[in-house]
Image: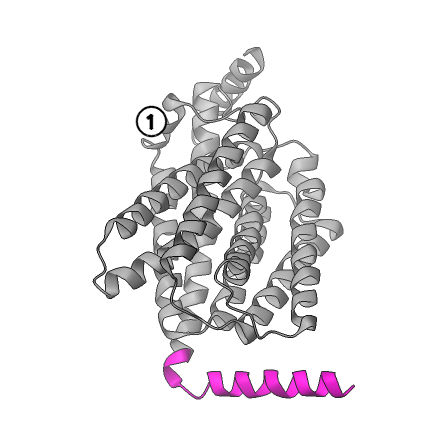
Amino acid sequence: MVLLLTVSASVTDQITEAFRDPAILAGIPLALLGAIFMSFGAQYQYRGVQKVEKLTGRSGGNGLDRNHLLNLLRRPSWLAGTIMLGLAIVCQLAALSVAPLILVQPLGAVSLVITTLLNARISGHRPTRQSIRSIIAAVGGIFIFVTIAAFFATERPVTQAQLLVILGLLAVTIVIFAVLWLVFRKHGLALFYIVASGVLYGFVATLAKVVLSRIRDQNFDWLTLLCVVALLAAVAVGAYFVQTAYSLGPPDLVIAGLTVIDPIVAVVIGLVVLQEAETAPLWAFIGFGVAGALAVYGVISLARNHPQVISDSLELPFTRGSSSDDSSADGSKSAS
């Protein structure tokens, strides 16, 4: 009881301290705006991927090839979604510049709720009780996970040795995912692409913060350049996995993986590699494990119980053209 009262008092004091600066309040609308851009961006990119598949009669579930990527660049919906996702990143970075992680990251998970409601309205697949429980588990788990991290993590300058460890882990991670991609690409597992993209974007978040810090300090050495190259490589591979995931699953499932796995990976890197929570009590690490497990369970459960996945219907009802065009496209797809 004493421990709970102590923790509660500490949490209350830190929340009160966070809101004493009026500038912090500006981070709330920025984070919410970023969540809205992410939701609509995911929906439009998903629409573009599905439209390209329908027009070409070829599925990208086994991995998008060069023709798929070129066709996506010609789809206005996909380009609009890409611009919106870019705006979402800008809003999130702007929010983090004025507000603490405890406010920004949980608000980013709102994009999962918005995307779920938006996709349900467009696709006609109403969320089931099980899928709603899965979303609550994912959002609740990441909220608890990031909140604990925000209270006990202390930001420190990243040493050269630590940065080399992060770059080494990223290289190993990309190689592992490349091997797994060769194994699973014929099986069309949406969960693999979702998890892989979430993990890679967790590295992107960490490296982006490091690169911005080194540029701000005018540190333009070879290690900074290597970080930029690694950052671009992680973004490229992660983006490829995301677009492939859109061929296999609904957009809210993809967003679930990104909003849950991305921050977990970033925080774990901070805890293990950067040792940003050395003074955290034992119960905090237990909380990390429980909250992280709850969030991951939510994503896996959503992948299994999403109504659009269960019905195996991935077509959106706002494609242009006549029904005969759609049926001919479907026929060519089944014939292939």
Q: Position of residue 213 (x, y in %)?
A: 31, 63
Q: Which residues are magenta?
A: 1-24
Q: Amino acid at mark 1?
A: Leu
How busy is the neighbourhood of tag 1: few (under 14 within 10 Å), some, or many (20 plus)? Answer: few
Up/down of 114 relative to 234, above or below? below
Q: To which residue does mark 1 refer?
A: 70
Residue sitting at x 28%, y 52%: 224
Is residue 47 toward the left or the right of residue 284 in the image? left
Q: Position of residue 290 (x, y in %)?
A: 71, 61
Is residue 136 toward the left or the right of residue 200 in the image? right
Q: Position of residue 321 (x, y in %)?
A: 43, 27
Is residue 93 toward the left or the right of residue 152 in the image? left
Residue located farthest toward the right when viewing the structure as drawn: 1
Is residue 49 toward the left or the right of residue 6 in the image? left
**From where the camera sits, is residue 80 visible?**
no
Residue sitting at x 53%, y 34%: 176
Q: Position of residue 58 (x, y in %)?
A: 49, 19
- Please name the colour scheme applied to the rendered image: one colour
Residue 14 lies in the magenta-colored region: yes
